[in-house]
Image (tube, rainbow, N blue to C red):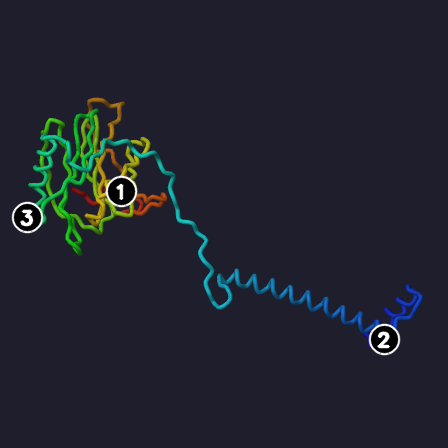
């Protein structure tokens, strides 16, 4: 009864306003228009509710998961260290070839003595009159360890042979090095996913980004080696090795492996010794 009285009052008001009395057809049209408006509003609300529900649940129609929108973490890349890096012995001369022969003689027995070692690369420093050479025996398919070594020589050929052992190819990053009052060295193996190795120091100096020595797929790992200067504020005073942490970084700037030297600081495993 309330709806009927309201409808009659509406018809009377329309008649007064327009000077005519709307007939039954007009009333039916007005009712249909109102019904369509109500239906449209209801449908819009339903679409909004369904869309909100999809976003909250993390799914689209059919139960498919929404794709993750989290870009991979990257680090700002530093200019690569300018190294006098060589990856073959052609034109190197008798002295450097002799260095290679010395290292090959100590690393080949590690692999059983039946395979020839290769010179992977060496980094030469005219400033320090030294070079660091990496020599390795190619791993056979399926092997999970590689025999390699790295040693520092004077440019005249003097040097000492370090210990040699097989390192696991599953270690994504290793670190070793030497130290003097003027310079330090750092070298190791690194996953083939890496395009550079970042070296951080204990004395707060600027980190160093090293290029990777690419083995061209002959080994399941790549290598790196470099010299770095000691703190000039303490000339003539031998110091502890100042390398603190290493990070392997891919070509897109994403860290793929990291380790702290000599510790498990921050929950990261210590860098295994390499070479």
Distance in Å between CA atoms under marks 1 and 2: 88 Å
Residue 155, by quadrant, is top left
Distance in Å between CA atoms under marks 3 and 1: 34 Å
- Residue annotated with mark 3: 113
131 w.r.t. 108: above or below: above
- Residue annotated with mark 1: 260
Question: In the image, what residue occupies the spot 29% across and 33% down?
Answer: 81
Q: Name which of mark 3 and mark 2 comes first in the sequence.
A: 2
Q: Position of residue 191 (x, y in %)?
A: 25, 47
State which mark lies toward you, 1 or 2.
Answer: 2
Q: Nearer the viewer, residue 120 or 64?
A: 120
State which mark lies toward you, 3 or 1.
Answer: 3
251 w.r.t. 205: above or below: below
Distance in Å between CA atoms under marks 3 and 2: 108 Å
Which label sits on residue 24?
A: 2
Q: Name which of mark 3 and mark 1 comes first in the sequence.
A: 3
């Amino acid at each position: 009864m309330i709806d009927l009285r309201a409808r009659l009052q509406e018809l009377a008001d329309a008649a007064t306003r327009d000077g005519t009395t709307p007939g039954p057809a007009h009333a039916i049209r007005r009712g249909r228009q109102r019904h369509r408006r109500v239906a449209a509003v209801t449908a819009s609300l339903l679409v909004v509710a369904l869309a909100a529900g999809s976003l909250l649940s993390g799914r689209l129609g059919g139960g498919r998961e929404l794709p993750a929108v989290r870009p991979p973490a990257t680090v700002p890349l530093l200019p690569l260290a300018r190294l006098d890096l060589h990856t073959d012995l052609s034109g190197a001369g008798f002295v450097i070839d002799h260095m290679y022969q010395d290292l090959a003689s100590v690393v080949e027995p590690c692999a059983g003595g039946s395979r020839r070692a290769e010179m992977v690369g060496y980094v030469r420093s005219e400033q320090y009159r030294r070079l660091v050479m990496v020599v390795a025996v190619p791993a056979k398919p399926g092997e999970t360890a590689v025999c390699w070594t790295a040693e520092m020589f004077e440019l005249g050929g003097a040097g000492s042979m370090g210990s040699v052992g097989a390192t696991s190819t599953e270690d994504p990053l290793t670190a070793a090095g030497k130290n003097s009052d003027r310079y330090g060295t750092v070298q190791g193996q690194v996953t083939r996913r890496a395009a550079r190795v970042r070296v951080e120091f204990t004395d707060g100096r600027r980190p160093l980004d090293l290029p990777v020595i690419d083995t061209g797929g002959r080994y399941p790992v790549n290598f790196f080696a470099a010299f770095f200067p000691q703190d000039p504020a303490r000339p003539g005073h031998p110091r502890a090795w100042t390398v603190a942490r290493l990070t392997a970084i891919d070509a897109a700037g994403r860290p793929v492996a990291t380790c702290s030297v000599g510790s498990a600081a921050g929950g990261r495993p210590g860098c295994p010794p390499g070479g």
